[in-house]
Image: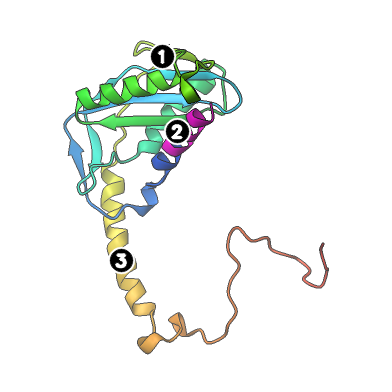
């Protein structure tokens, strides 16, 4: 069971590594993309699988061939399960590919991982998950138009690169003329209203 949770966590981390705010490469419109989704929760053993579906048009990164807006597809599945099946707080992952055969192999691998035939250490049978299928009549992925975002992110990357060059001081000096050693607090740091109060 720990191996299954590790595999799910690894897949979640891999899915979250690419965020839309970091887009700098140009996107291109893929003529056909195949996707399926997996939704699970750490609170129970129910795992939902969608059918493999075809997206007529999807935006991909021209260099890495990553599906742009992957999180939006996962949000579609999460919203469906939350509203229609009344199961909120699911972790949803969307798998994608341009080759249906390769994606089917990945689908079967994930299905075997969560099915009752799963084996633990030393080949012992372990209790599987409650696998539930969501067919295309119940849920259908909708294409996400990333055209505007790709154009804007390309312009922002060009502008931010030129601004960074202008702000950096020559010969390793501090940027924007700052000479003191103070720094602004980060978003994750709490702001104290009274710094004289000692807290344990």
**Sequence-first tag of 2 and 1:** 2
Q: Which residue is mark 2?
A: 7
- Give the farthest residue toward the front: 122
- The secondary structure type at the circle numbered 3 is helix
Inspect the magenta stretch and tell me whether residue 49 lies in it: no
Q: Position of residue 37 (x, y in %)?
A: 38, 25
**Sequence-first tag of 3 and 1:** 1
Front tag of 2 and 3: 2
Residue 141 visible to the viewer = no
Check if mark 3's residue and mark 1's residue have beta carbons within 8 Å. no
Q: CA distance from mark 2 to mark 1?
A: 22 Å
Q: CA distance from mark 2 to mark 3?
A: 39 Å
Q: Which residue is mark 1?
A: 134
- The secondary structure type at the circle numbered 2 is helix
Q: CA distance from mark 3 to mark 1?
A: 44 Å
Q: Which residue is mark 3?
A: 159
Give the residues drawn in magenta, as a range.
Answer: 1-11
In this rendering, the answer to whether 49 lies above or below 94 is above
- On the picture, is 100 further left or further right than 68? left
Identify which residue, 174 or 97, lies in the foreground. 97
Q: Position of residue 124 (x, y in %)?
A: 50, 18
Dot 1: few (<14), some (14–19), or many (≥20) neighbours within 10 Å?
some
Measuring 31% from the left and 34% from the top, which residue is drawn there? 144
- The secondary structure type at the circle numbered 1 is strand
In this rendering, the answer to whether 127 lies above or below 4 is above
Inspect the magenta stretch and tell me whether residue 6 lies in it: yes
Measuring 35% from the left and 19% from the top, which residue is drawn there? 140
Dot 2: few (<14), some (14–19), or many (≥20) neighbours within 10 Å?
some
Q: Position of residue 133 (x, y in %)?
A: 42, 13
Residue 36 visible to the viewer = yes
Q: Tell me the quarter of the image containing the C terminus.
A: bottom right
């Amino acid at each position: 069971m720990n191996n299954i949770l590790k595999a799910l966590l690894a897949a979640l981390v891999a899915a979250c590594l690419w965020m839309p705010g970091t887009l700098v490469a140009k996107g291109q419109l893929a003529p056909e993309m195949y996707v399926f989704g997996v939704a699970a929760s750490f609170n129970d053993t129910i795992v939902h699988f969608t059918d493999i579906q075809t997206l007529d048009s999807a935006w991909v990164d021209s260099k890495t061939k990553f599906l742009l807006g992957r999180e939006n597809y996962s949000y579609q599945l999460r919203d469906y399960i939350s509203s229609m099946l009344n199961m909120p707080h699911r972790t949803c992952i969307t798998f994608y590919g341009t080759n249906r055969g390769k994606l089917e192999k990945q689908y079967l691998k994930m299905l075997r991982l969560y099915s009752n035939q799963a084996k633990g250490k030393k080949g012992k049978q372990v209790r599987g998950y409650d696998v539930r299928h969501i067919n295309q009549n119940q849920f259908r992925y909708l294409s996400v138009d990333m055209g505007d975002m790709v154009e804007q992110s390309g312009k922002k990357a060009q502008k931010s690169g030129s601004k960074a060059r202008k702000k950096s001081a020559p010969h390793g000096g501090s940027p924007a003329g700052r000479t003191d050693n103070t720094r602004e607090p980060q978003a994750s740091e709490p702001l104290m209203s009274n710094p004289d109060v000692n807290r344990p």
